[in-house]
Amino acid sequence: MGRFRGSITKQSRREGINLAETEKVQKYLDKRPYAPGQHGQRRGRGRPSDYSVRLREKQKLSRLYGMGEKQFRNLFTEASNVPGVTGTVFLQLLERRLDNVVFRMGFASTRRQARQFVGHGHILVNGKKVDVPSYRVKVGDEIVVTEGSRSMGFIQENMEAQKRRRVAPWVELNPETFTGTFARLPAREDLALPINENFIIEYYSR
């Protein structure tokens, strides 16, 4: 199955959460808080099955991070074999993806855009170019926009917008030098995600 390239707004309406985490999509959700399509406002009247609830929660999280099912499940399997709370470990592994870290630092306005920036070679990790969006960032790694890419209009706009926002507490950012550091692993309370990861654990444990 290929990566989803359709409307993130429609997908957000289908899942009932802001998958892009942008103000534009949130305004659209506030205006149309129901599923897309001719019968969108009529859906959800019946009580969903337990399986349906858990499936939807899994879909929300995988679509939030822009991952396919195989990659998502493999990461969950890895998390389930690591000591600690499986749900928290899983979320931390998702947060350590390079495309996500680039998004969290504000170099990109969405994870989709961050994936493009990484894939096109605009990002350095500890001084070396990394073009794999799923690359796993470690605590202490330095993430930098390449010098030749800093004049790009999108990146300039993103950095100006980021100066007006609060950066995620587990990353450090210097917008003047287009440099960030993955300072620590996020705690579960750091992640204001509208997700119940226990449902996902139950989904994969069925």
Image: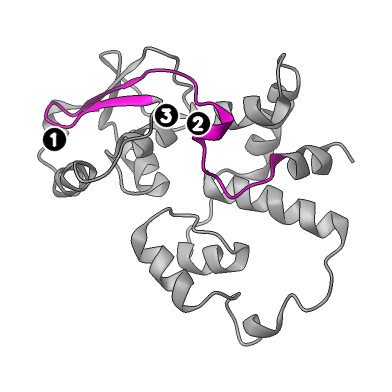
Tag 3: amino acid: Leu
Do we see residue 159 in this rendering? yes
User: Residue 108: x and y, percent?
Assistant: 30, 43
**Residue 118 placement (x, y as % from top left):** 34, 34
The quarter of the image holding the C terminus is top right
- Judging from the image, the colouring scheme is one colour
Residue occupying the point 44% across, 54% down: 20
Q: Residues within 10 Å of mark 1 (few under 14, many from 20)?
A: some
State the mark number for residue 141: none
Return the residue at label 1.
Answer: 150
Q: Are marks 2 and 1 in contact (CB under 8 Å)?
A: no
Please name the amino acid that badge 2 sits on.
Glu
Q: Pointer 3: what residue?
A: 98
Q: Residue at x 36, y 39 (%)?
A: 103
Point out the stretch of residues depicted in magenta: 171-197
Up the image or down, 123 lies above or below 126; here it is below
